[in-house]
Image (cartoon, rainbow, N blue to C red):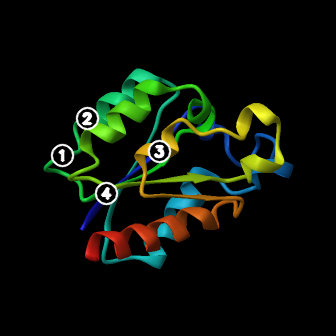
Amino acid sequence: MKILVLNGPNLNLLGTREPEIYGHETLADIEDAMRADHPQVELEFRQSNSEAELITWIGDTRGTYDGIIINPAALTHTSLGLCDALKAVADAVPAIEVHLSNTHKREEIRHKSITASACVGQIMGFQGFGYILALRALVNQING
């Protein structure tokens, strides 16, 4: 099983960016924890501050990946392009959306996810552990 883990804008700053909201873990820490939790799953991690790059990566998943875990970050609330890309591959490559913080406890603009409608589920509010929960859920989804 091969899963693509995508991270959107500013997530390269994890560990130092607003740790009271996002925690002290870095993306490398989260990657290590996911690999330790599911060593039998091949995981590929990518981060981009570019919406276009994320869309391209999603579009290239068919036939290569079994699923996507995506933290679109701020693009969650603005990107029809990401939503459309996820929908375009959803029949073959299911996705789960993950957020480090509980977006419903934050500013009102963060309460609505445009991308969630293209995903089989959404996990939020558990900081880095949310990625592990998303991985467990996605593996379960793929295995039926």
Q: Earlier in the sequence, mark 1 or mark 3?
A: 1
Residue 50 image point, x, y percent: 47, 23
Residue 21 image point, x, y percent: 81, 49
Q: Quadrant of residue 142?
A: bottom left
User: Front-most of 78 and 64?
Assistant: 78
Identify the residue under disc 1: 62
Q: What crowding class fits label 4: few (fewer than 14 Cα within 10 Å), some (14-19), or many (20 or more)?
A: many
**Residue drawn at (40%, 76%), measured in percent from left and top?**
38
CA–CA distance between discs 4 and 3?
Answer: 16 Å
Q: Earlier in the sequence, mark 3 or mark 2?
A: 2
State left or right for residue 142 relative to residue 48: left
Identify the residue under disc 3: 117
Q: Earlier in the sequence, mark 1 or mark 4?
A: 1
Identify the residue under disc 2: 59
Mark 1 in CB contact with mark 3 (< 8 angstroms):
no
Q: What crowding class fits label 1: few (fewer than 14 Cα within 10 Å), some (14-19), or many (20 or more)?
A: some
CA–CA distance between discs 1 and 3?
Answer: 19 Å
- The residue most toward the right is 20
**Residue drawn at (60%, 64%), measured in percent from left and top?**
130
State left or right for residue 31 relative to residue 118: right
**Residue drawn at (72%, 41%), measured in percent from left and top?**
111
**Mark whose residue sits in front, 1 or 3:** 3
**Mark whose residue sits in front, 4 or 3:** 3
Q: Earlier in the sequence, mark 4 or mark 2?
A: 2
* Quadrant including the N terminus: bottom left
Q: Which amino acid is tagged 4?
A: Gly
* Quadrant including the C terminus: bottom left
**Mark 2: which secondary structure?**
helix
